[in-house]
Amino acid sequence: MYKSQFPMRRQGWAALCAVTTLVLSGCKEREVAGTWSNASGSVALSRDDSLLYVVDADNGILAVVDTARREKVSEVRVGPRPERVAVGPDDTVYVTNRGGRSVSVIRKGDAVEAARVPVGVEPTGMALSPDGSTLYVVNSAMRESAARGSLTAIDTGTLTARWELPLGEEPRGIALLEDGRKAAVSLFRQGDVMTVDLSDANQPQVMRGGTDLLVKANRPSPSAAPSEFEPLPMNPQLGPRSFRSRGMVDLLSAPDGRRLFAPVLWSREDPLGGPVDGRGPNPGESMYGGGTPCGASAGGGVVAAGLITFDAEDEAPRPVVDDLDECKPPPEEKPDYPTSLVASPLFDTPLQGPAAAVVDPTGAWLFLVNQDSNNVAILPSWRRSGSDLVNETSPVRQLIAVGAGPNGIALTRDGRKAYVYNAFDHTVSTLGSSGNALGDIREEGERLVIVGDTLSPMAAAGRRLFFSAVDARMTSPSVAVSCASCHLEGREDGHVWGFPDGPRQTPSLAGRMTTATAPFHWSGEFSALGDFMSATVKDRMGGQELDADTVAKLGAFIDAIPAPDNAFHGEPLTASQTRGAALFTQAKCDTCHTGAALTDNRNVDVGTFVLSGVLQDAAAVIKTGLNTPSLLGVGRTAPYLHDGSAPTLKARLMNGRETNLHGTTAGLSDADMDDLVAYLETL
């Protein structure tokens, strides 16, 4: 038996309703909308809760578990890198195959696929219409465009696509609104929500491309509440105490459909200097340190777990969010929603890397699954305070330890049990109430092993280290970040960090032969991988100097991270791409971007140093130049340049075109640039 990490408070319990569900099921249930889901991420339950469906990305399977007997009863081979699972009203199971551009369809009781439906590139989120006739699938990218994703509608009767609607960059999660007449779609790296009108079954359209979330979170004073959507620039030169949301992997609805919730990571945008000279931490201190998320506004923690609440009763979802500079809601809004920064109640028990979430059937409680801290947080969904919470600095009622790398949760429809999939050790944790008056939630019995590792032992151990915000080798409780806090999914986060040596955009590590491309870092100041990792972990993350074995494990995992799917890679070149390939050589791009990793690993000056503003490149960096980045998978790694100032590939090529510092581009026309971009997207 695995116990909760801390008990709940007993004061004020008389004011709360009696316990009959997992947390407080005696509370009056809200009306349940037809679009509410009791599952998120890699797990789902059959309609009668008798079967648990689990997708394992490493092994490419859907496992079927008998919940009464707590044993795996069958295993279905699906497509490569299955991401999420959903169950229709008729108990048909749908699985998005992120590495296979498809959705697998499995009928209840079958041990084989009934069909595999082609969709877009890297499909992730799914939602079923209330009547089950339409499956909506979110594609991270399109077959025709690496720069934006799409939404595909599949007729579940014929298993054919009705339409595909282009969306923004890297969409991920989806939640249906107004009984399926609208949809909200999360944008992963931008940390925002688009709204889609589905009222015309044959002609969907984007109603709104974003919200004023970031403006609200960074309003200069509590009274300055903008009414129009005004996105913040991607550059960190915004002055002190600014924040950006990233990693919006999912959207979930309250049972009554009145609210949406989105787990995110909040990131600092202002300069991350040390306490003495602004150029780095003091000895024994971490550049990322500071403790609680609210400490971030005073120069503290740079990455914090968050939960964004959206009011879904307006025409489009409207964010209700704290002024993060003040760590409190603005005066005009009632704090009837969780804090936007979700702090752990205990200093030595971090809460980091939110990856999935679900609201219980009563609508009163939200279960937040945290991949990097290996736990599940339970918090009220319609308030931020109360005598039943652990303390006044956190909205969390309880924090429960589970296995490694949890990325999915499903609640039974009576709210009495929850199942969590621990992706890194391939096990299922079962959570249940101890039955006492306090509703203390515990992990019941032994974890059920679903399948074994396909990664090598070194790479599997390296993945646990890479995603850990709790391992003392990698971080400290006062910092509580992981490598994946910046390198989301082992890729990039679309964010620019205000480091002491200048603005630095997070580079992708996926499929780029990273460990073989020494020297390391944007400035190329580390000749050995171990030196680079130790400096990052010790000076920034609050961890320890890494020994050779730990470095080798991390390196083995980094080399095993699969490259993002690219619809253009390996395909016969189009006429435009062929012209672009010739221009790549003509413009001498291949002088620096050469070899298998498309980098010569040298430092150069391509005329992009930041010489003015709040955050400038350090003199030492300007003297030595910047290390040439790999171009592998470049089409899906926006924004570009070390300071993230180019939002698109074409903007990057147009930047300084006349100087010939970044290739011999002065003579290229706009049409030539389009062809060159078309070729770069194939790499």
Image (cartoon, rainbow, N blue to C red):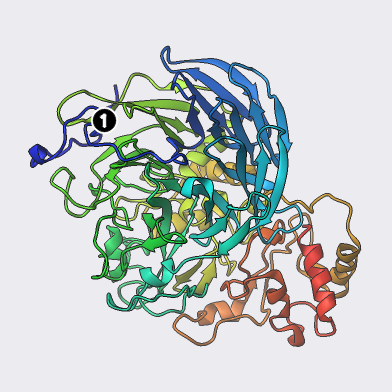
User: Among all residues in the image, which is located at the extreme top?
Assistant: 69
> Which of the two residues, 322 or 382, is positioned nearer the viewer here?
382
Q: Amino acid at mark 1?
A: Ile
**Left or right: 133 as drawn, with respect to 411:** right
**Left or right: 198 as drawn, with respect to 277:** right
Judging by the rendered image, the residue that carries numbered circle 1 is 441
Residue at position x 41%, y 14% in the image:
68
**Percent x, y for residue 206?**
60, 61
- As drawn, 421 above or below 655: above
Residue at position x 29%, y 55% in the image:
337
Quarter holding residue 271? bottom left
Q: Give neighbour class at mark 1: few <14, some 14-19, many 20+ (Cα, 10 Å).
A: many
- As drawn, 3 above or below 616: above
- As drawn, 640 above or below 542: below
From the image, which quarter does the N terminus lie in?
Answer: top left
Q: Secondary structure at mark 1?
A: strand
Number of dots carrying numbers: 1
From the image, which quarter does the C terminus lie in?
Answer: bottom right
Quarter holding residue 19? top left
**Left or right: 572 as drawn, with respect to 389:** right
Residue 461: in sight, yes or no? yes
**Percent x, y for residue 172?**
56, 50
**Percent x, y for residue 588?**
83, 73
Residue 520: in sight, yes or no? no
**Percent x, y for residue 14?**
8, 37
> Which of the two residues, 119 or 676, is positioned nearer the viewer here?
119
Residue at position x 37%, y 32% in the image:
402
